Each structure stands twice: as structure tokens, then as C-alpha cells.
Amino acid sequence: MKGVGVGEKVYAALRSVGAYTPQRCVSNKELETQIDTSDEWITRRTGIKTRYFATAEQKSSDLGIEAAKVALQRAKMLPSDIDLVIVGTLAPDFIAMPSTACIIASALGIHDRPAFDISAACSGFIYLLSVAKAYIESGMAKNILIVGAEKVSSVLNPQDRGTYILFGDGAGAAIISATQDKELSILNVHISADGQYQDYLMTPRSEINKKEIMQCMSMKGNEVFKIAVHKLADEVKHILEECNMGPKDIQYFVPHQANYRIIKAVGDLLNFDSSQIVLTVDKFGNTSAASIPMAINMLYENNQLKRGSRLLLDALGGGLTWGSAILHFDGE
Ligand code: UT7
């Protein structure tokens, strides 16, 4: 990896974003025909109206590659400019190896550079940001491609109405680059985890007919809901305090898109105005590590993101893992 000039104070900045949404849109009405649920229940309890599912042939890497191409192009960068590729996914192409990051890097023409995956489920994007920030501030890299690539449908049990209705597929990518301008940088990232809650949200392996291994998500939805509201409210409160800021100092609050009721509860507890809160859960459902970059991408494509826009992020997911970040957009 390339080094950065010795002795210069370097910060990490969000240079560009990109996203990819699979073509097939699945409405709540369509799910009503497959599983014991209703559009009314899903809308009232989650805020979700539609989600998108990848094709049988598409893998998480395929979604991630498309999102990464957009992020590279918007940053006006070539694959050779990238020093490191990191991917957050709960649905890697292969269980053990190669990593989805290696597959994405190679498809983009990024060779002879480190690439690895992070397993932090729905908190993946915030974990990616924290690693990218540390690599850049330590001078170990100048330009890092981070990708949340999630074919979540590949680990869903179509018979489990407690999870099947919640999730969707998608990918979001970002380029994190070195800058000397603190005012345009990633100011603070906080991540945490507590494995005592591991069985609240997991993808256990089960044997079918002594031949096939199935790996499907199971979730104690109610318990996760309560922990999410409490932990995320704490997270946001602390990161704002650490940065000596209040809700009014934030332009856009971009929470992980798991459930509208969680987002609203945290927003209300911390006195955010609904106009500050970015919502995509109605359209995409929960796309795990892709949800935050897909939401930032929506802001970008709606022309709402300007150089210097200040964002607050939060997420909680399997592990349990959670985290938050305060950062600026440093792109065009
Ligand atoms: O991104 C990772 C983090 N994940 C999350 O943050 C998800 C957190 N959890 C949630 O979002 C919510 O707990 C769920 C949306 C999963 C469930 O909502 P809930 O309000 O907590 O419902 P519940 O589990 O307490 O179930 C209420 C009722 C039950 O029926 P009874 O026992 O009251 O007769 C369920 O069987 O709703 C029933 N139910 C459904 N009904 C129709 C559960 N799922 C469905 C469904 N359609 N899909």
C-alpha cells in the first residue's frame, strides 16, 4: 500500500457514494400471496412497502461491483488509485473463502492490493468506516473502497414471516480518501459489540436430510427492537456529546433502515426534526450493511448532498454489533 507524506496530519473523508438496487421489486401485496401476512401489518409495524430481490444468479459481489463502479466514477478515480478494498456483508459469496472483497476487487481490476471482509451484519457500514478512517489517519492508505454488499434474500427462510418481510437485497459503496481539511472529514466513528446477545439475531446452520446444510436467519424481533431503541439512542447521544454538538448541528440523520418505528423512536428521544431524518425503509426494506450507503446515495441522487453536508449515522445488527458516526460529504 502507498504511504502518505510523513509528518502531515491526515484526516479521512467521504469522497463519493454509489449504490445498486436489483431489478425485481417485491411489494407487500406480493408477499401476502406467499406467506401469512398482510400489507396492513407490515406497513403499520415496520413502515416497509416494497423491497428488491436479486436474481438466483446474482451474488452479493455482483451487487457490490455495480455500486463500486458508480462510487469510483463519481470520485473520478481509476481502479489503480485504490489502496484497499473492504466489504461488509452477512451474505458472502462463499462461507469461508475467497472473501467477497477479493471477488469485487478483482472484477473491478484492482489487483495486488489488500482486500478483506468484515462481519458485523447490519452495522457493517459503520465498522467499514471505522477501519477505513484508522488506515487513512495512520498513513497506511490514501484511497479506500468500502462496500456493503448484501444478497440478504439468500439467507432468508421464506416460511418465516418474522424475518422474510423485513429484508431486501442491495449494495452501497463509498470511497474514503485522505484529506488535510478536518472540516470536511469523518469527525468521529464509534463501534461496539456484545456477544451475549448472539442468539437474538443469527444464521445458524442446520442439516436437512443429513445431506444439505441450510443457513437461514432467525431473529428474536421483539427483543432486538427494544435493545435497538435503547442502544441507538445512547450511541447518538454520546457521539453528539463527544463532538460537542446537538441535533441542530446535523444536516441529515441517516439511520440504519431496519424499522420505521425504531428510527422514529430514536429520532424523537433525541429531538431530531422529521425533516432531518433520511428514510428509505419504505422502498428498500432492511438491506443490512448496504442500507446506510444506499440512503446516502439517495440523498446524492436527489441533489441534497453538498460538499460539507454533515451526516450522523447509526446502526445495530447481528452479533449484536452497533455503532455511530459523524462525518461530512467531501465530494462533488
Ligand atoms: O437490522 C437488524 C436489526 N433488526 C431489527 O432492528 C428488527 C427489530 N425488530 C422489529 O423490527 C420488530 O420486532 C418486528 C417487525 C420484527 C416485529 O414487530 P413487533 O411489533 O415486535 O411484533 P411481534 O413480534 O411482537 O408480534 C406481534 C404479533 C404476533 O401475533 P400475536 O402473538 O400477537 O397473535 C406475531 O405472531 O404479530 C404477529 N406477526 C405477524 N403478523 C403478520 C409477526 N410477524 C408477522 C407478519 N405478518 N409478518
Image: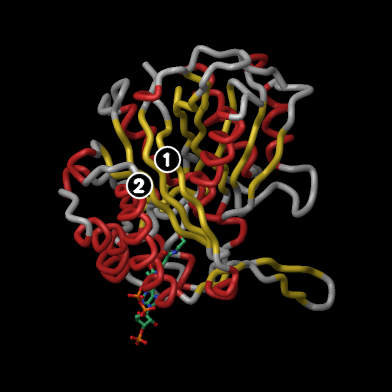
Relative side of 252 to 63, left or right: left
Query: Label 2 is placed on what type of residue?
Result: Glu
Where residue 176 is drawn, which disc sits there? none
Foreground disc of the pair 1, 2: 2
Q: Residue 157's image quarter? A: bottom right
Whether the residues at callouts 1 and 2 have beta carbons within 8 Å, the answer is: yes
Give the quarter the ligand 1 occupies.
Answer: bottom left
Q: Return the residue nearer the eye: 49 or 309.
A: 309
Give the color scheme: rainbow, by chain, secondary structure or one colour. secondary structure
Task: Check disc 1: other Cα within 10 Å, few if <14, some if 14-19, many if 20+.
Answer: some
The residue to which callout 2 is attached is 242
Relative side of 2 to 67, left or right: right
Q: Residue 31: percent from the left, percent from the top?
A: 41, 64
Quarter in which the C terminus is drawn: top left
Dot 1 beta carbon under 8 Å from ligand 1: no
Q: Is residue 81 above or below residue 145?
A: above
Q: Residue 133: percent from the left, percent from the top?
A: 53, 34
Q: Is residue 256 above or below residue 233?
A: above
Q: Residue 331: percent from the left, percent from the top?
A: 39, 19
Residue at the front extreme, as displayed: 7
Q: Return the residue nearer the eye: 46 or 113.
A: 113
Q: Is residue 300 above or below residue 163?
A: above
Disc 2 is placed on an element classified as helix
The residue to which callout 1 is attached is 188
Relative side of 319 to 253, left or right: right
Q: Residue 277: percent from the left, percent from the top?
A: 24, 46
Disc nearer the start of the sequence (1/2): 1
Q: Tell me how far mark 1 sits from mark 2, CA to CA.
A: 8 Å
